[in-house]
Amino acid sequence: MTDYLDLLGLPFMQRALLAAVFTGLAAPAVGTYLVQRRLALMGDGIGHVAVTGVAVGLLTGASPTWTAVAVAVVGAVVIEVIRERGHTNGDVALALLFYGGLAGGVLITGLAGQSGARLQQYLFGSITTISVSDVVVTMVLAVVVVLVCVGLAPQLFAVAQDQEFARVAGLNIRLYNLLVAVLAAVSVTVAMRTVGLLLVSALMVVPVATAQQVSRTFRTTLAGAMVLGTLASVGGLLLSAYASFHARVAPGPTIVLLALAGFVVAWPVGVWLRSRRRLREPFPVVPASVHDEIEDHPHEHGDDCGHVAVPHGDHVDYVHDGHRHAPHGRHYDEH
Amino acid sequence: MPDRVIELEAGAVALGGRPILRHVDLTVSAGEFVALMGANGSGKSTLVRALTGLHPLATGSLRLFGTPLHDFHDWQRVGFVPQRGGATSGVPASVWEVVASGRLTRRRLLRPMSRADRAAVSAALEVVGLADRSRDGVSTLSGGQQQRVLIARALAGEPELFFLDEPTAGVDLPNQEVLADTLSTLSGRGATIVLVAHELGPLAPLIDRAVVMRDGRIAYDGPPLAHDQVHHPDLAMIHVDALAHGHHHPEPERHDHAPHIASPLEGRP
């Protein structure tokens, strides 16, 4: 245990923890708007395009982080323009860029004379090798992403919810759509060092999917996703550090699997909450409906008789075995 | 002379190079309740989308509240209820949140909602009869209730001019009646309403004026028509009856694909 605490005290671990916190906050914030627009895979598409950006950095000797930002922003804008023009389906546009980006990245890395292992740092993350300047860049970009996503939440929500309404409301929807695309590109590159380009979309989408299992409002989904994203990335990093005494455990996949584990736990809860809400939805009050009298009912319905009690106008119907039994004097009516 | 809210002159809309609306003139005065009617594909939704600026005009001029569309920025005076299946998206949202997004026209960037904003959202929910559902998720509402949420969203901005695209499509009769009550309240407050409808149903008594579209042109513009009249093959006949009542209409138009044979003896019907 003291070994573990010593490990956490090392500078590279502290840098990794900082990067994990900021990545975990920023990625789900943008992800919420992508999921709202049913573009959950856009982060993945941008991630693939960013591979080419990293390779360009390796080829030219420039910082791969900045070339990845530049190429990812260009890719995100292209995806957005193709989607807006509507010439291709949104998902086809994404697919085209997926493969182009990945193939270009691998090809250019080869041209640069770099090994696959060097590229792999970016594909699957290498949070423990992150440098001080990379941490600073990650933190600044993440703060910008979070501030924009939270500060402009009313506008971004309206545009993602209903583009036509937002446009008639006088919002410049093209500007906001491009803003979301650029934010997505920036958070992809922010998360690149943490979980890697191929897994980046998981950190953008999975916490949102988990949060919406239990939330009913957009605001709680956004906040919940950011909290869950941070828990997953910090938790995954700590877990992989702890496990590293026994085996080779990479932080990136650990973070993603921890986020997925959160979803696996939340999903049955969501299913249960939704079915419970559906069962207890009040029955509509329809005037002059016919009902049968049940003469000999062996069971006494009551507040805690175990049957679902559903409000129905001025009384309660007890639901069991396909019946809706309403107490009426000394007998029950079938409603 | 009442204020002219919408003035469309010789408007034409082309989508992907194909002319959809041709030579459409439409003037709507403040406080009018206009129903745009016609069969599927007649261009009534396209006309509303042109009037809201969603489709650019290929030719012609459009003025809203006396200002050319190009210079029009008072979007808080316009409320729009788009044609769509529901109010849901990929992320859960509460009824309150969706309605509150209609208040954006009057909110400044990066400012929290003021007391007046909250009051307007509550009032809008009250008008459509969904005040008790404001905290529920939109996806738990029925289709008709979701339509009412979209109307409340337009109401929240307190506009003077409403565009509603097929608000009654796929909505059951009780919800249509609530809708009619809502629109009657709005109309009573002096709002101008332009409504696209395939069938009017309970809205029929509220209409001041019917505009019937056929094949991208206005085939009739006058007092409300019964449903069978709207789809009558010879709207021009109704036209003449309406003229007798002293309304002003454009010249009766012939369908431009049908051969037009006229001789000096035929004259006007």
Image (spheres, coloured by chain):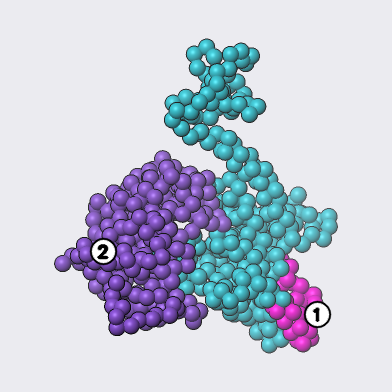
Chain colours: A cyan, B purple
Asked if residue B243 shows in the view, the reply is yes
Instruction: Select label 1 or label 2 by which is in front.
Output: 2
Please tell me whether residue B63 belongs to the stretch shown in magenta.
no
Foreground of the two, B156 or B30: B30
The three-letter amino acid code for the residue at tag 1 is Ser
Q: Residues within 10 Å of mark 2 (few under 14, many from 20)?
A: some
- What range is drawn magenta here? A100-128
x 22%, y 64%: residue? B244
Residue denoted by label 1: A115
Same subunit, tags 1 and 2: no
Foreground of the two, A74 or A139: A74
Residue denoted by label 2: B242
* Residue B126 screen position, x and y as percent: 35, 44
Quadrant of the drawing holding the C terminus of chain B: bottom left
Q: Main secondary structure of the magenta part?
A: helix
Please tell me whether residue A120 belongs to the stretch shown in magenta.
yes
Query: Callout 1: residue from which chain?
Result: A
The quadrant where residue B222 appears: bottom left
